[in-house]
Amino acid sequence: MKKMVGNEIVEMTKEEETEFLNIQKQAQEDTKKEKEENAKEELNRKNSFTKFVAMGLTEDEATTITGYKPPEEE
């Protein structure tokens, strides 16, 4: 693997390459974890919205409480 040093492209040492790959792997894992957490949070919002509407709140009221806005029908 190569890297830029000044105006030159040079070969990375094994340690640099290992560190780079570890950082890259950690970033991918962090991104995956964040996406999973966001999907779970959105599902919780949707489920809460549905429960509030079932309890008799209007969709606008449920949206105000949960932050979830159902997709508009066409």
Image (cartoon, rainbow, N blue to C red):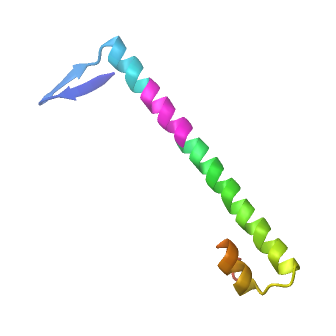
Residue at position x 60%, y 43% in the image: 33
Region in magenta: 22-30
Q: Answer above or below: position of 25 versus 51.
A: above
Whole-percent x, y for residue 61 in the image: 72, 84
Q: Is residue 45 left or right of residue 34?
A: right
Q: Position of residue 7 (x, y in %)?
A: 12, 30
Which quadrant of the view contains residue 58?
A: bottom right
Which quadrant of the structure image shows residue 16?
top left
In the rendered view, does 34 fall on the left or right side of 10?
right
Residue 24: x percent and y percent?
A: 45, 32
* Residue at image point 87% right, 78% down: 54
Residue 40: x and y in percent read 70, 54
Left or right position of 73 against 25? right
Q: Quadrant of the C terminus?
A: bottom right
Marks counted in the figure total: 0
Nearer to me, 29 or 73: 29
| Residue at x 26%, y 26% (from the top left corner) | 3
Residue 32 vertical position relative to residue 12 in the rendered view, above or below = below
Image quadrant holding the N terminus, namely: top left
Name the main secondary structure of what is drawn in magenta.
helix
The answer, for residue 32, to whether it is visible in the render is: yes
The outermost residue toward the left is 7
Quadrant hosting residue 42: bottom right
**61 in relation to 24, above or below:** below
